[in-house]
């Protein structure tokens, strides 16, 4: 694709994009232990507001959805307010931002779960590999799961 076309407007359903650049979601792990979107995140996304559309990082939909250190959530009022600050910063610069909703399922670990419970997934088959968890200096095996 040539640069002229890349920077041309694009109609995506009802959404008119100023260019064809779509920022893909990147899990950044900068929300802190409370998983509340913060000023650093607002600045990060506002700096990229000239993209045609931003798809924000994977965001936990519940307390049991986490599987990544300090990834943001959207299941508590403080987290929603944090995301509102992020979207306001992007909108102030003329950008469009959407949120990627996330539940880690079998890619989670008891270290991320309330009371160290087994993660809930659609399958009881453990993920292959190791989980980098907040409670470990290294990596831990993924556990077998509770089917939910």
Image: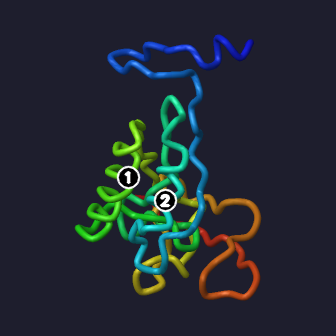
Distance Cα–Cα, label 1 vs label 2: 7 Å
Q: To which quarter of the image does residue 21 belong? A: top right
Q: To which quarter of the image does residue 65 belong? A: bottom left
Residue 69 appears left or right of 72: right
Q: Residues within 10 Å of mark 2 (few under 14, many from 20)?
A: some
Position of the N terminus by quadrant: top right
Give residue 43's mark.
Answer: 2
Please give the name of the residue rendered at 61% of the width and 88% of the height, measured from the top-left corner: 135
What is the x, y in percent for residue 12?
Answer: 43, 17
Q: Residue at label 1? A: 89
Q: Are marks 1 and 2 in contact (CB under 8 Å)?
A: yes
What is the x, y in percent for residue 125?
Answer: 62, 58
In the displayed structure, 22 sits above or below 99; it is: above
What is the x, y in percent for residue 76?
Answer: 27, 68
In the displayed structure, 28 sits above or below 20; it is: below
Q: Which structural element holds mark 2? A: helix
Q: Which structural element holds mark 1? A: helix
């Amino acid at each position: 694709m040539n640069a002229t076309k890349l920077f041309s407007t694009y109609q995506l359903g009802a959404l008119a994009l100023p260019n064809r650049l779509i920022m893909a979601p990147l899990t950044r792990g900068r929300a802190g232990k409370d998983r509340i979107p913060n000023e650093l995140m607002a600045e990060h996304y506002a700096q990229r507001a000239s993209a045609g559309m931003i798809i924000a990082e994977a965001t936990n939909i519940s307390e049991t959805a986490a599987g990544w250190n300090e990834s943001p959530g959207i299941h508590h009022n403080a987290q929603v307010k944090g995301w509102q600050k992020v979207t306001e910063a992007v909108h102030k610069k003329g950008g469009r931002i959407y949120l990627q909703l996330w539940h880690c399922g079998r890619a989670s670990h008891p270290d991320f779960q309330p009371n160290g419970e087994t993660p809930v997934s659609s399958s009881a088959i453990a993920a292959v590999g190791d989980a980098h968890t907040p409670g470990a200096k290294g990596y831990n095996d993924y556990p077998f799961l509770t089917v939910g």
